[in-house]
Amino acid sequence: MENEAFQEDDGKRYGTVDNGTRQRTFPNGTDNDASHDNKNVKDSGGVVIEPIKLKRSVGLISGTSLIVGTIIGSGIFISPTDVLDRTGSVGLSLVIWSLSGLLALLGALSYSELGTMIRKSGGEYAYMKEAYGDVMAFLFAWTSVIVIRTSSVAIISLTFGEYMATFFPMCGSPENIKKLVAIVVIVTIAVVNCIDTTLAARMQVFFTGAKLIALMIIVVGGLIRLGQGHVSQFEDSFKGSETNPSSIALAFYNALWAYDGWNNLNYVTEEIEDPKKNLPRANILAVLLVTVVYILTNISYLTAMTAAELLSVDAVAVTWGDRVLGGAAILMPLAVLFSTFGAANGTLFSGGRVVYVASREGHLPEVLSYVHCKRVTPMPSIVFTALISIAMVIPGNIGSLIDFFSFTAWLFYGLTVGSLILLRFTRKDLERPLKIPIIIPIVFVLIACYLVIGPIVQDPKIEFLYAFLFVIGGLLFYIPFVFFKIELRIFAKVTEFFQLLCEIVPSPYEPDD
């Protein structure tokens, strides 16, 4: 059914039809706008039909900010102690941080080839669908949408609430207030992302810049203290190093989670300006920047406190600020607030695109792939992701549950990079603007396999089985609604209702020229 409610805009009239296009007419019945390209269709009445699709508003700087902003959350400010605890020495811990950054770079390079070869948003979903088919792609979307992405937004927002409460010590720390603050954060970033993708990208640049300034203060302060001779923690720095391979593997696991987010730009490929160039450049630049910042920040912490002190404090950056900055130490809690807000924005920004693409491919309700006809933002997918995130905030204590789903992230990372290897043989016809040496994805897949199997072998728990069953449980929805294409009439009514209420329309995929 056509939507007859055309919108006036500078003397032009816009309307929408079911196939995701925008009709444009002019007062004199002729086409007075030469800006449209030859993909548009004009009927005999002078109506130009333009496809509605997401705007390419993410450039090199905003793309790099998206990756950096989602990698750097609150962890580097609060308690980067796990790696040091597992390795047993300062020297080995810094080696682990460096090698983990290298592994993230291998993943970023692999995703860069995939993203420039398959220029669709959705990240892992799009690549696994191309390589393995619908079932694997659906299971990723199911797990990501219901647990991985939404839980990340919830936990980051709760962290924001925790630190906000520290500014009001007289009020205590009531849990309900923290949850309310977290919900306000989620609603705020959802509204911004629904209003304007460009505004969301600019906000990401601002908050990423703010957290990098805070980290630069820590780095510069550390370099100054090194120059003043505070080097005791780096003398004989490998003394006491752990030699147990299992402990070292767990140290890698902890460090790699600190780098998680290096793949986020691939979720918004269709919104990147010139993705053939900017996607790989942003991926590489962001990972290198974060690696350098992480190493220098850890060094700086150790110029102001001993390794034993670093292991014992909960908020490392705050303790560092108290000892080095004096009265300016208030900058550190503010840095955590900026960091968590930016990370939540970046996670919601990219996570909503998984919903958007999976819905467009028929793996989720179609209405979730629609975009606002005037603002051209994926409003339904953003709102859906935000609502599930809020639902996870309400019970609050979800961290223990999410820990047992963490291994699924590296399971899907390994499968995704494995698809790059598979496509080298099955789809030789695909254009590859970037082609990396095959040894890079092979090494990455082997390490990913160990990271998936290692925790289960080292500490087998029934919760890992529950998590696996949850992933496979997605087939209960895939078989009837995707494979057999069972359609409930109420879905059509609901879709029509939300189309009219929210002014949203379909957005079919259009390949680049």
Image: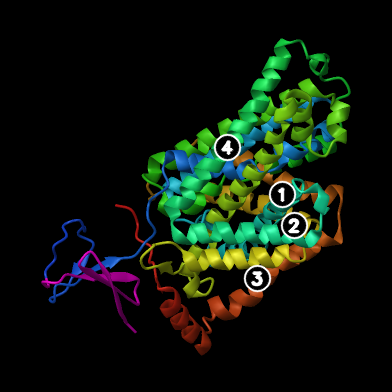
Mark 1 → mark 3, Cα distance in angstroms: 37 Å
Q: Is residue 304 above or below residue 24?
A: above
Mark 1 → mark 2, Cα distance in angstroms: 8 Å
Location of residue 136 by image quarter? bottom right
Q: Inspect the image, locate mark 3, and give the three-letter code of the amino acid beneath it.
A: Gly
Mark 4 → mark 3, Cα distance in angstroms: 40 Å
Q: Residue at x 81, y 47 (%)?
A: 169
**Main SS of residues in magenta:** strand
Q: Is residue 49 above or below residue 116?
A: below
Mark 2 → mark 4, Cα distance in angstroms: 23 Å
Of label 4 and label 3, which has the lower sequence position?
4
Q: Nearer the viewer, mark 4 or mark 3?
A: 4
Residue position marked by numbered label 2 in the rendering: 178
Q: Residue at x 61, y 38 (%)?
A: 104
Residue position marked by numbered label 3 in the rendering: 474
Which residues lie in the magenta part? Answer: 1-29
Res. 210 mark: 4
Residue position marked by numbered label 1 in the rendering: 164
